[in-house]
Image: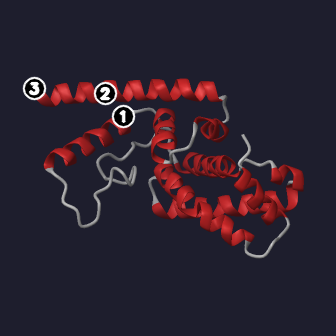
């Protein structure tokens, strides 16, 4: 799948057109920062990873890729993949042998899961949100990432496949299994809370 707008923007960066780099950053900085934040759980690390991702993308587009490759580049999933690789390298560098726990009930997972400013949520909605965040925290890193890419970042399956480096049909199956696992956890947690 070719991202026509992305290919055009990638080509503009490759050709060093005026304002192209700024358009690239403005178009993708919030998405990439949010993704890095969800992976790393630290705003300053996420900011550094996002900056590094743009620097690596610029380097690739201007010095390693030719015009044809830039023109046919699926830019958004490519940028997500760069961000993912840098974030994982950072996590590996700072992580001890035991995998870090995923923070629960802090509201940063998704704009849809956060409190809306100025709005008062009902106690029931707060409990549902906390339950969902707790269940997300219990998923494996891979399952959690797939759910975040599909339902928070709203990437299509084809783009997720590029980000994680696997086939689209495999991604569909993995997302399905991750959702099934999440539903089972939620059902189990709700049953436990009802006791």
- Residue 6 appears left or right of 35: right
In the displayed structure, 134 sits above or below 65; it is above
Question: Residue 82's spot in the image, x, y percent?
Answer: 67, 50
Give the labeled residue for mark 3. 195
Give the labeled residue for mark 1. 138
The alpha-carbon separation of the residues under discs 2 and 1 comes to 8 Å
Give the labeled residue for mark 2. 185
Question: Residue 69's spot in the image, x, y percent?
Answer: 85, 49
Q: Earlier in the sequence, mark 2 or mark 1?
A: 1
Residue at image coords 68%, 64%: 24
Q: Are marks 2 and 1 in contact (CB under 8 Å)?
A: yes
- Residue 73 appears left or right of 145: right
The number of discs equals: 3
Secondary structure, mark 3, is loop
Dividing the image into 4 quarters, which one contains the N terminus? top right
Residue at image coords 18%, 25%: 191
């Amino acid at each position: 799948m070719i991202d026509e707008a992305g290919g055009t923007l990638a080509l503009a960066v490759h050709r060093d057109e005026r304002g192209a780099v700024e358009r690239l950053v403005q178009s993708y900085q919030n998405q990439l920062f949010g993704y890095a934040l969800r992976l790393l759980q630290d705003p300053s690390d996420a900011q550094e990873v996002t900056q590094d991702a743009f620097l690596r993308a610029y380097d690739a587009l201007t010095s390693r890729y030719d015009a044809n490759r830039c023109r046919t580049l699926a830019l958004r999933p490519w940028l997500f993949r760069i961000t993912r690789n840098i974030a994982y390298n950072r996590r590996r560098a700072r992580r001890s042998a035991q995998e870090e726990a995923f923070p629960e009930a802090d509201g940063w997972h998704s704009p849809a899961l956060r409190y809306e400013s100025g709005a008062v949520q009902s106690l029931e909605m707060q409990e549902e949100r906390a339950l969902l965040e707790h269940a997300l925290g219990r998923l494996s890193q891979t399952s959690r990432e797939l759910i975040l890419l599909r339902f928070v970042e709203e990437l299509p399956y084809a783009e997720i496949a590029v980000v994680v480096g696997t086939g689209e049909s495999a991604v569909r199956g993995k997302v399905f299994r991750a959702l099934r696992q999440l539903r089972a956890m939620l059902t189990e947690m709700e049953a436990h809370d009802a006791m």
